[in-house]
Image: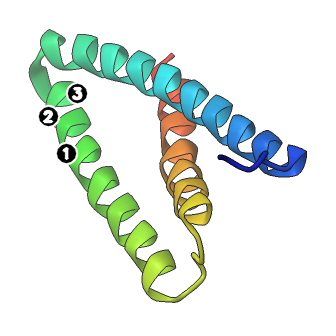
Amino acid sequence: MTRPVPAATAAAWSRLWLDTSFLMADAAMVMTMRGWRMMAGGRPAVREAERMVSEKVEAGFELAGAVASGRVKSPEGAARAAIGTYGKRVRANRKRLG
């Protein structure tokens, strides 16, 4: 028999799911806009490709640092850290490219 999940826990995981969904939608838009820019070719395409790779490396190191430092203490905390780390970059790119 399963125990009922406390309302606060269910709400926190629901919010996490919602935030993840928004991040996925924004990331899809950024991927599309970057694709258009890269298909156009030239120096802007090269800069965009370089930026894309460097941002991913920076975000990976930032997230790894948060985990290694002990600031992340739970699976939910790891998911929140990932959403925060990647989300700020995705939102900035969406604004810049849009």
Which of the pair 39/65 is nearer the observer? 65
Residue placed under numbered mark 1 in the picture? 50
Q: Amino acid at mark 3?
A: Pro
Q: Is label 3 in a helix, a strand or a loop?
A: helix
| Residues packed near mark 1 inside 10 Å, few (<14), some (14 to 19) or many (20 plus) | few
For the view shown, which residue lies furthest in the right direction? Answer: 7
Residue 39 picture location, percent across and down: 14, 12
Residues under numbered marks 2 and 1 in contact, where contact means CB atoms less than 8 Å apart: yes
Residue 63 picture location, percent across and down: 44, 67
Residues under numbered marks 3 and 2 in contact, where contact means CB atoms less than 8 Å apart: yes
Q: Is label 1 in a helix, a strand or a loop?
A: helix
Precedes in sequence: disc 1 or disc 3: 3
Name the residue located 45 percent from the left edge and 22 percent from the top edge.
97
Residue placed under numbered mark 2 in the picture? 46
Q: Gap in Å between the C-alphas at discs 1 and 3?
A: 10 Å
Q: Gap in Å between the C-alphas at discs 2 and 1?
A: 6 Å
Left or right: where 95 falls relative to 36: right
Q: Is label 2 in a helix, a strand or a loop?
A: helix
Q: Gap in Å between the C-alphas at discs 3 and 2?
A: 5 Å
Relative to 39, residue 78 above or below:
below
Name the residue located 77 percent from the left edge and 47 percent from the top edge.
5
Q: Amino acid at mark 2?
A: Val
Left or right: where 63 falls relative to 41: right
Which of the pair 98/72 is nearer the observer? 72
Left or right: where 67 falls relative to 58: right
Residue 70 picture location, percent across and down: 54, 87
For the view shown, which residue lies furthest in the front direction? Answer: 1
Quarter of the image where one finds residue 80: bottom right
Relative to 65, residue 77 above or below:
above
Residue placed under numbered mark 3 in the picture? 44
Please state which of the two labelled residues, at mark 1 or mark 3, is closer to the viewer: 1
- The circle drawn on residue 92 is none
